[in-house]
Image (cartoon, helix red, strand yellow):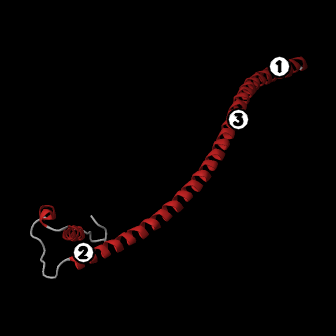
Amino acid sequence: MSHSLGIMIESLVAVLLMLTIGYCMLLNTRLKRLKADEHSLKATIAELITATEIAERAIGGLKHTVRDVNENLGNQLASASQMSQQLKKQLAEGDNVFRRLSKIAIAARPQGAAEPAEPVAAAAPRMSSAKAVAAAAQAFSDRRRTDGLAA
C-alpha cells in the first residue's frame, strides 16, 4: 500500500506539474500579446506626441495671426472713425454752403416773380444769366433730400 500511495502522490504531482506547464504556456501567450500591445501603444503615443507638438505650433501661429489681425483691424477701425468724422464735417459744411446758395438764389429773385411753370432747361434760353443761376439754385434746393443732403 505504501508503494501505491507513493505512485498516487507522484501521479498527482505529475498532473499538477502538467497543469502548471499548461498554465505557464497560457500566461506566456498572454504576455506575448501584452508585449505586442505595448509596442503598438508606444507607437500610438509617439504619434500622439508628434500630433500634439504640431497642434501646439499651429496654435502659436494662430495666436500670432489673431494678434496681427486685431492690431490691423484696430488701426482700420480708428481710420474709419476718423474718416467718418471728416465726412460728417464735410457734409455739414456742404449743407451750410447749400443753405447760403439757396439764400443767395432767393435774394436774387425779383420780388414779384412767381415760380416758373416750365422746367428750368426749357426756360433757360429766355432768362438772363443771373436768373438762370437763380432758377438752377432753386431747382437744386427743390431736389434736396429730407436728411439735408442734395440729390
Identify the residue at image location x=13%, y=74%: 115
Residue 105 image label: 2
Q: Are marks 3 and 2 in contact (CB under 8 Å)?
A: no
**Image location (x, y in percent) of residue 128:** 17, 68
Identify the residue at image location x=10%, y=66%: 118
Q: Residues within 10 Å of mark 1 (few under 14, many from 20)?
A: few
Q: Is residue 73 above or below residue 113?
A: above
Q: Is residue 44 above or below residue 106?
A: above
Task: State how many labels appear.
Answer: 3
The label nearer to you, 3 versus 2, is: 2
**Quick check: 106 left or right of 24?**
left
The C terminus lies in which quarter of the figure?
Answer: bottom left
**Image location (x, y in percent) of residue 15:** 79, 21
Report, in whole angstroms, how far the alpha carbon at label 1 lies from the one at label 2: 130 Å
Q: Which residue is mark 3?
A: 45
Identify the residue at image location x=9%, y=70%: 117
Direction left: furthest residue: 117
Q: Earlier in the sequence, mark 3 or mark 1?
A: 1
Quick one: 106 or 126, which is closer to the camera? 126
Residue type marked 1? Ala
**Image location (x, y in percent) of residue 54:** 66, 38
Quarter of the image holding residue 92? bottom left
**Quick check: 144 left or right of 121?**
right
